[in-house]
Amino acid sequence: MSTLRCALLQTSIQWLNPEANFSLLESQLNGLPAVDLLILPETFATGFAFDQPGVGEHPQGTIFTWLQQQAQAHACVVTGSIAVQHEDKLVNRLYWIKPDGSFDHYDKRHLFRMGNEHQYVIAGSERKIFTLNDFRILPQICYDLRFPVWARNRNDYDVMINIANWPAARRHAYDTLLSARAIENQCYVLSVNRIGEDGRGVDHNGGTAIYDFKGQRMQQASDNEPGLITETLSLDALAQFKQHFPAYLDADEFQCPL
């Protein structure tokens, strides 16, 4: 299919309270229109709390099961990230869950050392591309946004997703980098950030938005308010733009270091 119907959910995350977050999210998803893809923020069930005891769940635990239930209930792919136990630490794992319960995942590559994420989390090493309705989709998590080499389009994806707990204090950087990633990679960018104050008193004001391949916003959620935005992406429109302005053909050859 040459279209992709997307829904992006901006929400306030209750600190270390998955059940409260499930209830809140379910109320926000009541009446969700038919979509192909539903995107939730980074660590949507707990907040960015990797240093807190018990925050990590075993693979395919309670939060994972809830995601599977939502994918089945809404007949779409659902994605968001979870703190998952791995070896003696954790991984910040984005799950990509289909309506039939099958799944894939991407582990966050760049760990936010200013928040000590690197002390508790193991960095991912595999760059993933998912496919849905003929769209090739690159998943990224929050701080990954600052590292363009990892996200560089090798003409192997059409849409970049970035899910985040990006603080209000650095919101200008968030908006600027999202637009830049869309422009330089000639792709759609779907960004989902949270709102509200976390358990450490860090404020988040949103920025959930859909950017086209020119870096222009197609849709944006209101700041500091929970909200659901939807958009239908066109693969034909992207192909026509790249045909008329094929900057990707002049990209430098390189290998991404691991």
Image (cartoon, helix red, strand yellow):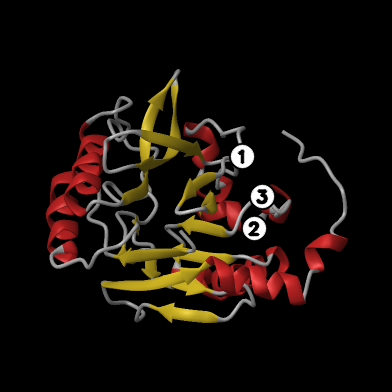
Q: Which residue is mark 2?
A: 146
2 left or right, relative to 102: right
Residue 224's x, y, as percent?
32, 77
Residue 127's x, y, as percent?
61, 39
Q: Nearer the viewer, residue 170 or 72?
A: 72
Q: Which residue is mark 1?
A: 127
Question: Mark 2 or mark 1, which is nearer to you?
Answer: 1
Q: Characterize the local packing of mark 2: few (<14), some (14-19) or many (20 or more) Cα atoms within 10 angstroms.
A: some
Question: Mark 3 or mark 2, which is nearer to you?
Answer: 3
The kind of residue tagged 3 is Asp
Residue located 70% across and 54% down the image: 153
The kind of residue tagged 1 is Arg
Element class at badge 1: loop
Residue located 18% across and 65% down the image: 28
State how far apart marks 3 and 1 are (Cα).
Answer: 11 Å
Residue 220's x, y, as percent?
41, 79
Residue at far front of view: 1
Looking at the image, can residue 111 be seen?
Answer: yes
Q: Which residue is mark 3?
A: 156
Q: Is residue 50 above or below residue 15?
A: above
